[in-house]
Image (tube, helix red, strand yellow):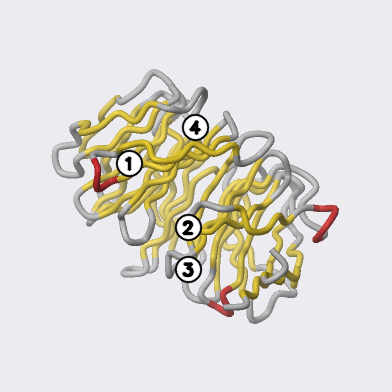
Amino acid sequence: MSRIHVKKLHTFLGHNDSIYTLQVLDDHRFISAGGDGMVVMWDLRSPDEGEVIVKIPSSVYALTYDPRDGFLYAGQNNQGIHKIDLQAKKEMKSIQLGEYQIFDIQIVGDVLWAGLSNGEVLVLSKDLTILKRVKYANDRIRSIDQIEGEIVIGCSDNVARVVDPDTMDVKQVLKGHKNSVFAAKYHPSGKYLITTGRDAHLKVWDTQENYLLRESIAGHLYTINDVIFRADGRYFITGSMDKSVKLWDAHNFRLLKVLDKHRHAGHGNSVNKLLWMNYRDLLVTCSDDRSISVWEIKFAE
């Protein structure tokens, strides 16, 4: 662990409530949103203050950005999805989806997939017309991720479902967690999948062996809210309700470093979302403590 050096570079403040989600825009800019409904753009090259793009009436758990046309899509809890023009800094369109929470939105090809709290996944065009809706569970759809030819959906009924993106049929049901699955992410190579959840465990599934469960690791003390990979696939990061951020080796799944309040002036509450930015290889984390932290991680490689 001594060969990895961590330094906290910045703390971004300005949100008035928990920050639930982050979204990359480009190498150095990202968006944050949370309980206060503010959608804020930050620039790692000028970290002094963020820029409020729009104010949404209630909390936001889900963001996704389409770099092809410059539109951001935000999921407002108990209302619907908003299409936002970042350059013009205004909402272009919205759709009401009923009294549901929206936990994730992902761009799949030329459409949007949105995971709802009633166990449905909605497929929408980019002008926010509903094209299809499929109910996969009787509880929340927490996360959506994809590799070529497959999509994984993390669900609060304790399982992850591997889905065909064309037919939306379930190809695999991954059982192993004892509680809600909060995050499901493919390794950049697609060779395996990591799921995390309320049981504080990491599950590693071998995609090349019919999603065989390879590893089950007690990763944190409480719910693991998010997991992300470094772009080169050598490392991954987890963020937890136990207030800590952990760095792992993505080849042997060994814990390499713990970032917490005591050792590294980390977050004082649940860590909800993570980004690994291309700009200077910086890590960005957000929390219920209403702050965003920016970390420099140097490897003696």
Who's the residue at 51% across and 52% down the image?
253
Amino acid type for the residue under numbered disc 2: Ala
* Residue 183 horizontal side relative to residue 188, left or right: right
Amino acid type for the residue under numbered disc 4: Gln
Amino acid type for the residue under numbered disc 3: Leu
Q: CA distance from mark 3 to mark 1?
A: 23 Å
Q: Secondary structure at mark 4?
A: loop
Q: CA distance from mark 1 to mark 4?
A: 19 Å
Residue at the spot of label 1? 152
Q: CA distance from mark 4 to mark 2?
A: 32 Å
Is residue 140 depicted above or below 295 in this figure? above
Percent position (x, y) of residue 88?
A: 47, 69
Percent position (x, y) of residue 285?
A: 64, 57
Who's the residue at 75% across and 68% down the image?
8
Q: CA distance from mark 3 to mark 2?
A: 25 Å
- Residue 25 is marked as 3
Amino acid type for the residue under numbered disc 1: Val
Q: CA distance from mark 3 to mark 4?
A: 24 Å
Which image quadrant is residue 44 in?
A: bottom right
Residue at the spot of label 4? 101
- The residue lying toward the viewer, choosing from 52 and 92, is 52
Q: Secondary structure at mark 1?
A: strand
Decide which of tag 3 and tag 4 comes sooner along the chain: 3
